[in-house]
């Protein structure tokens, strides 16, 4: 078992996230970035319940600027790596998982596959806080899946201004 697997309560092969993964497989990179950007705020707030470390929020903000072409990748990357460092240093497993959810959501601007970390680490944070089979985790799983479906169906993200490198991922 890898170190990452020891930190996660949920894996891509788990039944709880099967619908989310199936839906994500048909989504464009831009759709995944829009979804991850929208839903990462929930985990910033969860992290901030346990820590006043600003690096996690900064990573989210930097990713939004990067996605809009207002920040270059090397600078955004520094913020994202700082959020991972905040996760390692916070001393609380719920906060650590929430911070990693945000950092992975921020990294989705680089690779849409990172958006999966938003769900896996986010659900892990809630699973650690409330219990893996809790109503809160089940509700969040549905919220994440329904949110992705809504973002993909409404396509409001297509109206947003995105960086040139993301424009090619419009459907």
Image: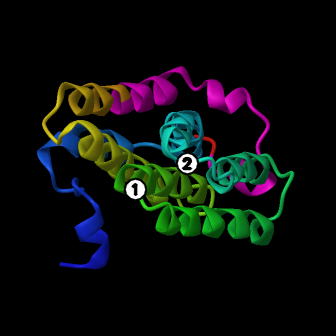
7 sits to left or right of 156:
left
User: SS for tag 2?
Assistant: loop
Q: Residue at x 62, y 56 (%)?
A: 109
> Looking at the picture, how far across and down is residue 115, in whole percent?
46, 52
The verdict on residue 157 being magenta is: yes
- State the scheme by which the image is colored: rainbow
46 sits to left or right of 143:
right
111 sits to left or right of 149:
right
Depth check: give the residue in front, 70 or 6.
Answer: 6
120 sits to left or right of 40:
left
Q: Residue at x 50, y 57 (%)?
A: 104
Q: Residues within 10 Å of mark 1 (few under 14, many from 20)?
A: some
The verdict on residue 148 being magenta is: yes
In this rendering, does residue 143 appear at all? yes
Q: Which residue is mark 1?
A: 92
Q: Given contact means CB atoms under 8 Å apart, are the residues at marks 2 and 1 in contact?
A: yes
Q: Residue at x 57, y 63 (%)?
A: 86
Q: Is residue 129 above or below residue 80?
A: above
Q: Which residues are magenta?
A: 144-169
> Looking at the picture, how far across and down is residue 55, in whole percent?
67, 56
In this rendering, does residue 22 appear at all? no
The tag on residue 42 is none
Q: Residue at x 52, y 37 (%)?
A: 35
> Looking at the picture, how far across and down is residue 25, in whole percent?
35, 48
Q: Which residue is mark 2?
A: 51
Depth check: give the residue in front, 146 or 94.
Answer: 94
């Amino acid at each position: 078992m890898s170190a990452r697997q020891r930190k996660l309560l949920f894996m891509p092969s788990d039944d709880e996230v099967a619908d989310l993964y199936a839906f994500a497989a048909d989504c464009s990179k831009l759709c995944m970035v829009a979804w991850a950007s929208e839903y990462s705020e929930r985990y910033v707030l969860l992290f901030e319940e346990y820590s006043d470390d600003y690096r996690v929020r900064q990573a989210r903000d930097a990713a939004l600027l990067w996605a809009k072409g207002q920040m270059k990748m090397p600078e955004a990357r520094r913020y994202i790596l700082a959020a991972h460092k905040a996760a390692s240093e916070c001393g609380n497993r719920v906060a650590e998982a929430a911070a990693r959810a945000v950092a992975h959501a921020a990294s989705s601007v680089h690779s849409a596959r990172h958006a999966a970390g938003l769900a896996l680490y986010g659900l892990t944070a809630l699973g650690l806080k409330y219990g893996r089979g809790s109503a809160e985790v089940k509700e969040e799983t549905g919220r994440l899946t329904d949110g992705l479906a809504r973002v993909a169906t409404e396509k409001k993200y297509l109206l947003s201004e995105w960086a040139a490198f993301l424009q090619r991922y419009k459907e």
